[in-house]
Image (cartoon, coloured by chain):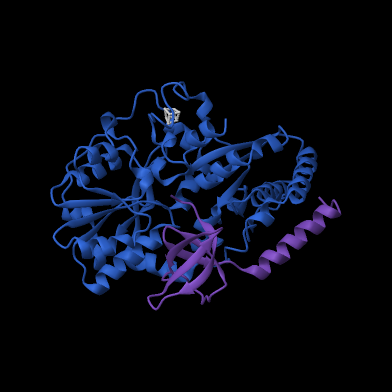
Chain colours: A blue, B purple
Amino acid sequence: MKFIDEYRDPALVQGLVRGIQQRAARIGSQVTIMEVCGSHTQAIGRYGIRALLPNTIRLISGPGCPVCVTSGADVDRALHLARQSGVLFATFGDMLRVPGTGGASLQQLRAAGADIRVVSSAADCLELARTHPSREIVFMGIGFETTSPTVAAMVAACYERGIQNVSVFSVHKLIPPALQTLINDPALSIDGFLCPGHVSTIIGVEAYACIPAAGRAAVITGFEPVDILEGIFLVLGQILDGNKEVTLQYRRAVSPEGNKRAQSLLEKVFYPSPAEWRGLGRLPASGLAFTEAYQAFDACKRFPIPEMVAEEAVGCRCGDVLRGICSPLQCPLFGSRCSPAHPVGPCMVSTEGTCAAYYKYR
Amino acid sequence: MCIGFPGKILSISEHNVARIDIGGTQREVSLDILDEPVSVGDYVICHAGFAIHKVDEEIAREKLAFLATIIEQEAF
Ligand code: SF4
């Protein structure tokens, strides 16, 4: 398969592993690298990348699974919206089994009769609105900068076509503010970051300037084994020569300036607003709220939501896992009370969740 | 849900929707948020029903060749 098979070539993989071993030996001390993106976590597990690395290199997983970083209160708000009469709640499938306070989930609501539909694209809401004119379509707007432009495109299309029975519950998150928080965290000492390839497709290279500014290495990395190994190889290179910058490994799919069209669509419909992250807390300008012109599409305005006090599942360490200070293996519930079939926390639900990836590839 | 993957454009409809091939399965993606022109035969990165970037074949080829050279010469 083109653009896949070449990046799984054993000769390239072995060559890069040798390069990594040599560079790690020259560095001599322990190196901690965080992969920010859930798709990286999943690929690292799937291809057994950890086992290929010298033991001085430690890979830790970050907050890059959108479902996982959604706060408990926001999960509860989604459940509240899905319960409203006349509402058809549309969501990406990953959200279905995420437990809210008391363990309730969208899946349970659906079994109890709520109209909850799984869509694979925000654009599917346009068709739902057309075929269900007497219903209120509420879309769960979740995801990072890769996904939010697709939601903005859907909202803009509704606006242009005068479609009125669609609104969005926006829990979108922005990656750079989360990185800044992780850099500032004294409990973590991260030497370098593998930056998320497809988020970068949209936001470009400059958006990560805070990483080298803090003296850490940054490499925008693709998702195949050769990409990930080259990303690690390049992080080590930056550490060796002391020259920290944002290197673009994933050039075939990322242009330095990002996707300008997607960026301007995003800016038209949304602006950065404070947001609550599971694990990281409330971060300024790290979520997306509707701009003046698109206010009418805000589901929280259309359906007033009461104050929510969320309760986390007892013993679940998702918050620490998302900050990179705890490995899933250190959670007492991992593999016993908590498994993909019976997830206690969101990190065990999504296939990109760190706990789910560790469970599947352990 | 964040998964992105490369697919080959098989056809483009008048509504700016492309039929793409991903390793044998076909899907439809909107081309509405791409910021460069694409045509049949091009590869695009697809995510959540949208193409988000054209895959730059030339850069991909050059980079792979460069990587192979470094490895061959053990120039680490
Ligand atoms: S293993 Fe389960 S309970 Fe433990 S942190 Fe992960 S999701 Fe939470």
> Where ligand 1 lies, by image quadrant?
top left
User: Nearest the camera: A175 or A16?
Assistant: A16
Q: Position of residue A185 (x, y in %)?
A: 50, 38
Q: Residue A297's image quarter?
A: bottom left
Residue drawn at the location 26% of the way across and 68% of the way down: A158
- Looking at the figure, which quarter contains the N terminus of chain A? bottom right
The residue shown at (58%, 38%) is A45
Q: Is residue A346 visible to the viewer in this orientation of the structure?
A: yes
- Looking at the image, the residue that sits furthest to the front is B24
Callout count: 0
Query: Can residue A187 be seen in this snapshot?
Result: no
| Left or right: residue A222 compared with residue A149 | right
Residue A231 image point, x, y percent: 66, 50
Instruction: Give coordinates of residue A70: x percent, y percent.
Output: 36, 43
Q: Is residue A227 above or below residue A59?
A: below
Vertical placement of residue A280 versus A328, above or below:
below
Vertical placement of residue A281 versus B67, above or below? above
Whole-percent x, y for residue A286 in the image: 39, 51
Asked whether A167 or A241 is in front, the reply is: A167
The quarter in which the C terminus of chain A is drawn is: top right
Front-most of A195 and A45?
A45
- A234 displayed left or right of A202: right
Residue at left offset 49%, top offset 66%: B20
